[in-house]
Image (spheres, grey):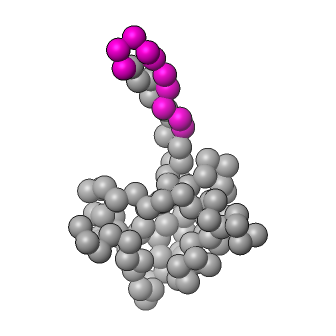
Amino acid sequence: MATRLYQVIRRPIITEKGLGVKELQHTVVFQVAKDATKTEIKEAVQRIFKVKVDHVRTAIYHGKMRRRGRAEGFRSDWKKAYVKLASGEKMIEYAENL
């Protein structure tokens, strides 16, 4: 189970929108495994970062077609998770140096 925790959460998403939601809504944004469920994401964040999670929202982004010269291909589909921390919890700091 411990190895699955680190397979569920791939990386934090550090964008302007992601940092805005972090400041205003007490929510952190992660790229997660495409087959991960909301309960798996909640458990992984709680165990890895040792915080309480209020709820999780997810969104699936479909890969776009990209070209480089004559070569064509598709970017892979990916899943984003918005994880709202419980009130009174300390914010996860993954983007301190920005």
Q: Is residue 72 magenta?
A: yes
Q: Position of residue 84 (x, y in %)?
A: 47, 70
x 35%, y 14%: residue: 69
Q: Position of residue 83 (x, y in %)?
A: 49, 66
**Residue extent of the magenta highlight:** 68-77
Look at the image and tell me whether residue 39 can be seen. Answer: no
x 62%, y 70%: residue: 44
Q: Is residue 62 above or below residue 98?
A: above
Q: How many marks?
A: 0
Image-based side of 74 in relation to 8, left or right: left
Q: Position of residue 10 (x, y in %)?
A: 54, 57
Q: Is residue 73 magenta?
A: yes
x 44%, y 23%: residue: 65
Q: Is residue 83 above or below residue 53?
A: above
Camera-nearest residue between 73 and 83 = 73
The residue sitting at the left extreme is: 98
Camera-nearest residue between 87 and 22 = 22
Instruction: Find residue 28 and report its image quarter.
Output: bottom left
Q: Is the N terminus in the top left, top right, bottom left or bottom right quadrant?
A: bottom right
Look at the image and tell me whether residue 16 can be seen. Answer: yes
Image-based side of 4 in relation to 72, left or right: right
The residue sitting at the top extreme is: 70
x 34%, y 59%: residue: 14
Image-based side of 98 in relation to 53, left or right: left
Instruction: Find residue 55 and report its image quarter.
Output: bottom right
The residue sitting at the right extreme is: 1
Q: Position of residue 98 (x, y in %)?
A: 23, 67
